[in-house]
């Protein structure tokens, strides 16, 4: 690790479409979503609309993916949304997006340490008769992830693939058992009725639901390491969105049917009392203790895989910003033998360690506060990024002569921007349903972090324009832009 490669040294041509699909889906791995995100959604919102929310969000993101995938043919940058906004709206907006992305991905990655410590620590303590604090397990996972983060990216993809396949198998078994033994005696439309989603708690449901798609940007993040960026990224993005939407909707529906919709033993009450245990207890009742224990172990690997995927994404964001000297240039260093952005990886590990330590000292609940609140912060940042990227796609194609049609260039991105902005509004105005008191300042402070990050990034970008024009002119330009750019007068940029 002592030797370092020059800037821009990510390992090229290592990842195929399925590698990137594994990174994307593993960022919100099925057992993490079902055992952590879905049960938390039922617990904090009391809404039965989680299954339908995955379908709605998948449709919105599929529309977003039209313009996003079209632009990915011309832009390859480990900073992904950062480069998209820089080339579509202007360099200062690109820096603003990068600050929001760093906040959003660090938030969800660190929040998952709370979920991991709560669920895995509780299971191991019970089985081994230990009394270790949840943070012990979180820090152990943090150390292992920090090590993997500085190794070869294709090794990381292999680890994620093994975990992902195993947990998909266990969830498929659960789905069959659950749908075969519904609590009400027969299957119902609970969870699929629009009235159960489109009510006062929709913002909370959408906030935790969008977290299941939080690895959406992975395709673009790993574009510089893809074997064929012009085709691989679009293919991986569509596969990941389809799989995530269908699989999670089906599995959360199966969980709802198996536990039951209402009452003291209904899904909301059970999830509030048991957290991930709502899933594992139900599986144990439907099968046997061994199957439930195996599911808990795979849940641990699922959360671990998600943390590893987000860790790699954050490290590459730091790398992209360091390479272009938007942030200190040392972040643009990679290992000679591994091609991994190890400085960014180490920085992400340090940030996570600091935040988890603060949570421990302050007595923060690892599940209902650390995980839930940071998932909400991440959701606000992610949807803001998706909205901005949709607008940037339009700006990008307005200034370039390409073969894409009007649907890809203008209509789909504009529709996506409107839909995503609506989702963002619902999340922010319903933040109280994420376990934050309406009277608490956190009601506005937590979602406000995204606005602060965006403003600070914009200010920093404009400052670079004034005092470091050489850096400013290079923002987002490591991306592969092979098109003739029309005169600046055709579109206003900073």
Image (cartoon, rainbow, N blue to C red):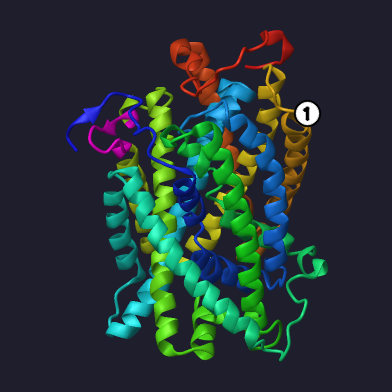
Query: From this viewpoint, is residue 438 visible?
Result: no
Total of numbered circles in the picture? 1
Instruction: Determine whether, in the image, residue 167 is placed left or right of residue 195.
Output: left
**Residue 315 makes an appearance in the image:** yes
**Residue 394 falls in which quadrant of the image?**
top right
Q: Residue at x 33, y 53 (%)?
A: 353
Q: Is residue 179 magenta?
A: no
Rendered position, 259 above or below 171: below
Residue at (32% x, 80% y) in the render:
125
What residue range appears in magenta? Answer: 331-343
Residue 300 shown left or right of residue 262 in the figure = left
Relative to 348, 193 lies left or right: right
Residue situated furthest left in the rendering: 2
Name the residue beneath numbered marker 1. 406
Q: Secondary structure at mark 1?
A: helix
**Residue 383 occupies quadrant:** top right
């Amino acid at each position: 690790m002592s030797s370092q490669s020059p800037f821009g040294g990510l390992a090229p041509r290592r990842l195929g479409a399925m590698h990137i699909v594994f990174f994307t889906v593993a960022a919100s791995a099925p057992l993490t979503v079902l055992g952590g995100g879905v049960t938390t959604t039922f617990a904090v919102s009391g809404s039965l609309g989680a299954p339908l929310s995955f379908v709605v969000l998948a449709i919105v993101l599929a529309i977003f993916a039209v313009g996003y995938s079209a632009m990915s043919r011309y832009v390859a940058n480990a900073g992904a949304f950062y480069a998209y906004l820089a080339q579509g709206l202007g360099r200062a907006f690109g820096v603003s997006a990068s600050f929001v992305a760093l906040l959003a991905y660090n938030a969800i990655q660190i929040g998952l340490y709370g979920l991991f410590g709560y669920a895995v620590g509780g299971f191991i303590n019970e089985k081994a008769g230990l009394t270790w604090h949840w943070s012990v397990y979180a820090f152990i996972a943090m150390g292992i992830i920090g090590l993997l983060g500085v190794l070869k990216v294709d090794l990381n993809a292999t680890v994620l693939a093994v975990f992902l396949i195993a947990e998909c198998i266990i969830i498929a078994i659960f789905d069959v058992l659950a749908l075969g033994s519904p609590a009400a005696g027969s299957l119902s439309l609970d969870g699929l009725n629009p009235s159960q989603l489109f009510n006062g708690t929709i913002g909370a449901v959408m906030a935790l639901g969008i977290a299941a798609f939080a690895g959406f940007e992975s395709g673009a993040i790993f574009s510089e390491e893809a074997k064929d960026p012009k085709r691989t990224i679009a293919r991986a993005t569509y596969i990941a969105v389809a799989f995530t939407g269908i699989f999670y909707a089906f599995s959360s529906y199966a969980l709802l049917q198996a536990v039951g919709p209402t009452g003291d033993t209904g899904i909301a009450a059970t999830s509030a009392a048991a957290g991930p245990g709502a899933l594992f207890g139900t599986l144990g009742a439907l099968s046997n203790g061994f199957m439930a224990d195996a599911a808990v172990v795979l849940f641990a690997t699922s959360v671990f895989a998600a943390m590893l995927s987000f860790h790699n994404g954050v490290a590459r964001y730091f790398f992209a910003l360091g390479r272009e000297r938007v942030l200190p240039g040392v972040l643009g260093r990679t290992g000679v033998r591994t091609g991994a952005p190890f400085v960014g990886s180490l920085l992400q590990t340090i940030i996570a360690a600091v935040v988890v330590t603060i949570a421990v000292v302050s007595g923060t609940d690892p599940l209902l506060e650390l995980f839930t609140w940071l998932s909400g912060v991440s959701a606000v940042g992610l949807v803001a990024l998706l909205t901005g990227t949709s607008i940037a796609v339009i700006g990008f194609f307005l200034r370039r002569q390409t073969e894409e049609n009007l649907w890809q260039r203008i209509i789909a991105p504009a529709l996506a921007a409107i839909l995503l902005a609506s989702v963002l509004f619902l999340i922010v105005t319903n933040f109280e349903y994420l376990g934050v008191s309406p009277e608490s300042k956190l009601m506005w402070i937590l979602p406000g972090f995204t606005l602060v990050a965006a403003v600070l990034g914009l200010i920093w970008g404009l400052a670079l324009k004034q005092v470091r024009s050489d850096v400013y002119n290079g923002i987002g330009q490591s991306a592969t832009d092979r098109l003739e750019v029309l005169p600046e007068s055709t579109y206003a940029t900073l």
